[in-house]
Amino acid sequence: MARFSVPVSILDRANNREGFSEADALSAVLERAEMADRLGYRRFWVAEHHAVAGIAGSAPAVLMAALAARTGSIRIGSGGVMLPNHQPLVVAEQAATLQALYPGRIDLGLGRSVGFTPAVRAALQAGPAEAEQFEEQLGQLLAYLNGTAPITARPRDSGRTPVFVLATGAGVEIAARAGLGVVLGGPALFRRNSAGQTGALERYRSAFRPSDRFPRPYVLAAVNVAVADSEEKARELLLPEAHAMADSRTKGVFPALSPAEGAAALSARQQDLVRATLATSVYGTAGQVHGRLEELAASFGADELLVTGGAFDIEGQRESDRLLASLF
C-alpha cells in the first residue's frame, strides 16, 4: 500500500471519560503526544474550551508547554486559542515564549469563537462584539510577533511561529488576507460544489495574499478518523463522542465520554445528529481509511491532514493512532 501523499497530524481536545478524573484526561493527552512523537506524526495540537463538563482542555498554552517538554521533535500547537477571549499581546507573548524554549516546534492556531454559554461569555468578559473584532485582534497579534507594533512581544519571535486560522464563519477570508494557513473541517469540508471543491477553500485560495509565514495557501483538512481491524470496531470508537455531540446540540451540555454500549436511548433528533457526525468522519480498516483520506486530500488539494475525534476506549485510540501511522 502506498504511503500518504501528505503529512498527518493530531488534534486532541482532552476529552473527559466517565469513571476517570480530569487529571487522568490530561495525562492521557500527554501520553498520546509522546506516542505520536515516536510514530512520526507532524503536529500535535490541543484546543481551548471553558467550563465544558466533557473536556479538560481549557488552557492551551499551559498544556503546550507540558507537551513540548515531554516530546522531542513533533510540532506542538493550538487548534486553537480563541483570540476573542484574550488580549492579543498576551497570546503573542505566550507563543513567543514557547518558541524560544522549543525552537522550531511551536504552532499557533487561532479561532474566533467566544464562550459556549452566556455564563461562560460573562466570566470571560467576552461577547459577539469581540468575535467581530477578530481580524483587528489578529492584526495586532501578528504585529507584536513581527516587531512592527509600537511594542514588541518578548522574547522576540521574528515571524518564526506559523499562525493558522480556524475556518469558522469569515475565518477563511481573514486567513487569506493575512497570508496565514487555514484549518477547515466538519461539514464545511464535506460540502462540495459541482467542481468537487468547497466554496470556503475557493474563497481562501483566490483571496490569499502571500506573507513571510506562508508564501502560498496552506490547508489543513481536519477530519474525525478512527482505524481498527474492522469497520464496525472503528465506528464504535467514534460513537461516544458522536453521542456527546448530540447531547450538546439537544441538551446544551457536552458530557464526559461514556462507553458506546452504555449510552442512554437516543431521541430521533439525537440519532440524526449521530448519523451526521459519522457521515463527516472517516473510519474503517487501514486500507479503507487510506483510500478515503487520500481521496479527501486530493479532492481539496489539502497540504496536510489533521486527525480529530476522541474515543472513550484509550487502548482503541492508541491502536487507531498506530494503524494510521503505519500508512505514512
Image (spheres, grey):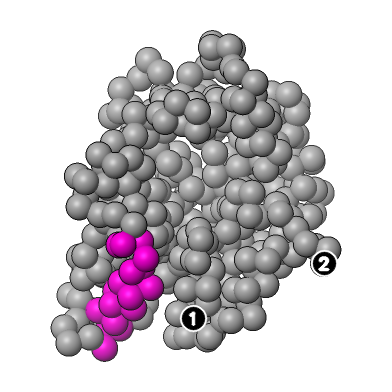
| Residue 146 within the segment the image draws in magenta | yes
The residue sitting at 70% across, 48% down in the picture is 327
* Callout 1 crowding tier (Cα within 10 Å): few <14, some 14–19, many ≥20: some
Residue interval drawn in magenta: 129-148
Say which amino acid is labelled 1: Arg
Q: In the image, is 174 to the left or to the right of 123?
A: right
- For label 1, the residue is 177
The residue sitting at 39% across, 37% down in the picture is 14
- For label 2, the residue is 195
Q: Name above or below for residue 197 compared with residue 24.
A: below
Q: In the image, is 165 to the left or to the right of 127?
A: right
- Whole-percent x and y of residue 103? 33, 69
Q: Name above or below for residue 305 compared with residue 175.
A: above
Q: In the image, is 242 to the left or to the right of 253?
A: right
| Lower position in the chain sequence, tag 1 or tag 2 | 1
* Callout 2 crowding tier (Cα within 10 Å): few <14, some 14–19, many ≥20: few
Label 1, label 2: how far apart the Cα atoms are: 24 Å
- Whole-percent x and y of residue 5? 72, 61
Residue 308 in view: yes
Q: Quadrant of residue 7?
A: bottom right
Residue 142 in view: no
| Residue 142 within the segment the image draws in magenta | yes
Q: Name above or below for residue 306 compared with residue 52.
A: below
Q: In the image, is 249 to the left or to the right of 328?
A: left
Label 1 sits on a secondary structure element that is: helix
Label 2 sits on a secondary structure element that is: loop
- Whole-percent x and y of residue 28? 39, 33
Number of numbered callouts drawn:
2
- Whole-percent x and y of residue 256? 41, 25
Q: Looking at the magenta stretch, what is its main secondary structure?
A: helix
The residue sitting at 50% across, 28% down in the picture is 250
